Amino acid sequence: MTPKNFENKIEEKIAEAARMLATAEYPVCFTGAGISAESGVPTFRGPDGLWEKHDPQKAVSLSSFRNQPEAFWDFARELVITSGASPNPGHQALARLEEQQILKTVITQNIDMLHQQAGSKNVLELHGSLEKADCRDCGARYSWQELEKILKRDETPECRNCSSLRIKPRIVFFGERLPEKVLENAWQEAQQADLMLVIGSSLQVYPAAGIPDLTLQAGGKLIYINADRGSRPEIFQLILTGRAGSILPRLADSALKISRGD
């Protein structure tokens, strides 16, 4: 297929996705690391992924954090600080769709807070967020802004009250359960949705990866937007391969025009 034909095909698929989105009664989206990769946030898997540089059982396991918290902060520094990430057009397009009362909810596996920074309000963070942290020894609380300043100095955060290094962000480590209320809300949203946009997720990390199946089982449809066709292409009614930062703004523009009757 020539580049021109490929682009024509993508435009046809975007138009079809826009019609599905604009006419859906309760559309939601599910996002993974791929949408933030375009903002410079490193992905976890693949040849350049963080798991090639950091042992996940040392960097983000609860058992390791108790004894070696420095390993987590080295990982966190590379995940967020080094990237200097900010929301990209994909994040912004989803926020615009929510503002215009088309998209109902963002369910995300990401911990980078970029959806909120873009303006999304109804965000369910399955794996928690870096926004707040707590000292595991004395209970002192910290904001991400406080910790970010320390990390930028290439230092490991130390508790101002008890000098402990075990300041843990409210994210889900290996060995921890997903936040029960958030997971229940995500299940409810997925079951209620008649359309789910699945964006930038490999759908390999469970139980989060099973959430799109709930929409499918309830009779809803799934649209996949990702750099490749992923590991489970058979579950999707429509697949758009490419950069979410390019596809989503065009999808949002088209869906909003249809909803307004333009």
Image (tube, rainbow, N blue to C red):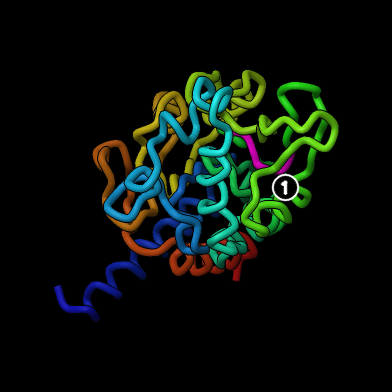
Mark 1 belongs to which amino acid? Leu
Check disc 1: other Cα within 10 Å, few if <14, some if 14-19, many if 20+. many
Quarter holding the C terminus? bottom right
Q: Front-most of 185 and 56?
A: 56
The percent coordinates of residue 196 (x first, y second) are 48, 41
* Residue named by callout 1: 147
Residue extending farthest to the front is: 163
Q: Front-most of 124 and 114?
A: 114
Any part of residue 187 in sight: no
Magenta part of the chain: 128-132
Q: Front-most of 184 and 12?
A: 184
Any part of residue 23 in sight: yes
Q: What residue appears at the point 40 percent right and 44 percent down from the top-left corner?
A: 201
Residue 165 horizontal side relative to residue 200, left or right = right
The chief SS type of the magenta part is: strand
Disc 1 element: helix
Quadrant of the image occupied by residue 182 = top right
The percent coordinates of residue 219 (x first, y second) are 42, 29
Q: Front-most of 224 and 102?
A: 224
Quadrant of the image occupied by residue 186 = top right
Q: Is residue 13 above or below residue 235?
A: below
The percent coordinates of residue 203 (x first, y second) are 37, 37
Q: Examine the structure image and report whether residue 237 is included in the region drawn in magenta.
A: no
Q: What residue appears at the point 41 percent right and 26 percent down from the top-left corner?
A: 206
Q: What residue appears at the point 54 percent right and 23 percent down from the top-left corner?
A: 62
